């Protein structure tokens, strides 16, 4: 069970690191408006204002540190049964 948990955490760290390596910035909407405006005219839709948008720009060191720490956690998960006296699968 612990092996699968640490393997999943390491895999997610590597995936998030690769995603941060590929993007320049990400826009996150923190709150949604309570009511959406609906327009009956197809060519001039009503403009809805996004409330609470946040732009995240990861520094250059974030992707590499996430990938490296995820790799270390995956390697730890692969050696976990031998360290605790269990059989290697």
Image (spheres, rainbow, N blue to C red):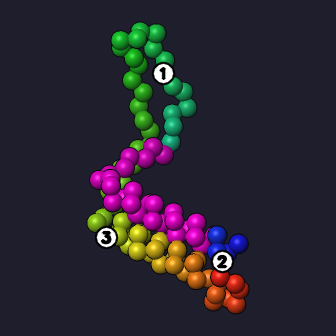
Dot 3: element: helix
| Image: magenta residue range | 5-30
Can you identify the residue that label 2 sits on? 89
Can you identify the residue that label 3 sits on? 61
Give the residue at x 45% y 65%. Answer: 14
Dot 2: element: loop
Relative to 86, residue 6 above or below: above
Question: Which x, y percent locates residue 76?
Answer: 55, 81
Relative to 34, residue 25 above or below: below
In front of the other: label 2 or label 1?
2
The picture quadrant where one finds residue 69 is bottom left
Label 2, label 1: how far apart the Cα atoms are? 57 Å
Relative to 1, residue 54 above or below: above
Instruction: Give the quadrant of the C terminus.
Output: bottom right
Label 1, label 3: how far apart the Cα atoms are? 41 Å
Label 3, label 2: how far apart the Cα atoms are? 35 Å
Can you identify the residue that label 1 sits on? 37
Question: Which x, y percent locates residue 52?
Answer: 44, 43
In front of the other: label 3 or label 2?
2
Task: Based on the picture, tell me whether residue 43 belongs to the magenta stretch.
Answer: no
Dot 1: element: loop
Task: Based on the picture, tell me whether residue 12 belongs to the magenta stretch.
Answer: yes
**Principal SS element in the magenta part?**
helix
Give the residue at x 45% y 14%. Answer: 39
Tag 3 and tag 2, C-beta contact below 8 Å: no
């Amino acid at each position: 069970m612990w092996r699968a948990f640490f393997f999943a955490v390491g895999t997610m760290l590597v995936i998030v690191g690769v995603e941060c390596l590929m993007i320049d910035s990400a826009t996150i909407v923190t709150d949604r408006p309570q009511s959406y405006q609906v327009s009956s005219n197809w060519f001039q839709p009503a403009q809805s204002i996004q409330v609470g948008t946040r732009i995240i720009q990861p520094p250059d060191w974030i992707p590499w540190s996430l990938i490296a720490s995820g790799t270390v956690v995956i390697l730890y998960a692969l050696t976990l049964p031998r360290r605790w006296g269990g059989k290697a699968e």
